[in-house]
Amino acid sequence: MQQTRLHSFLDQLDATYRVSHHDDAFTAQDLAMAEHVPGRRVIKPVLVRADGQFVLCALPACYRVDLEELKAQIPAEHVRLADERALAELFPDCDTGAEPPVGRLYGLVTLMDESLTADDHVTFQAGTHADSVTMSLAEYRRVAQPEIAHFARHV
């Protein structure tokens, strides 16, 4: 497995984490199945544009972003999902759709949905569709330094 920007970042912070290699997982729910963990333990990153600024939302795989709730939480006038071109520009070292939910690694604010606080360990893509990282939620919060909000709805 290649050393990615994420791994270097985690190592610089002396983070405790486990890397897994698995068959390609193109969605967070696919990752949950590949890792044999519930979808609520897999962090799905969703990039949004709020009043012209990009924000990385982190939420469980089995949830979706409620844009109206997010607009109220941020607060912002206009909130929309970012397109794949923006993902490619902001995360040049990642496969599209395999971005890690660590916005500060890319100069972005990370907004974590409060529903993620229910589990003690989390898993997320590590920049490729075939690699993932698992760590304690406390460790994720330490390295990602997310703001906590309520903006996701169970699917």
Image: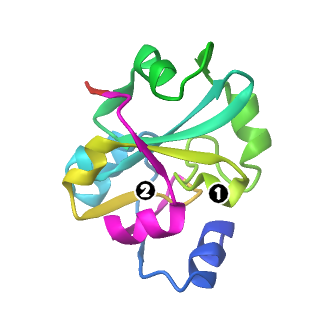
Pointer 2: what residue?
Answer: 124
Looking at the picture, how far across and down is residue 70, in whole percent?
46, 24
* Res. 21 visible in picture: no
Q: Amino acid at mark 2?
A: Phe
Secondary structure of the residue carrying numbered label 1: helix
Is 42 positioned to the left or the right of 6 in the image?
A: left
Is 26 positioned to the left or the right of 119 in the image?
A: right
Q: Amino acid at mark 1?
A: Arg
Q: Residue at x 71, y 48 (%)?
A: 91
Magenta residues, start to end: 129-152
The stretch drawn in magenta includes residue 145 = yes
Pointer 1: what residue?
Answer: 104
The stretch drawn in magenta includes residue 131 = yes
Which quadrant: the N terminus?
bottom right
Dot 2, crowdedness within 10 Å: few (<14), some or many (≥20)? many
Q: Residue at x 34, y 69 (%)?
A: 138
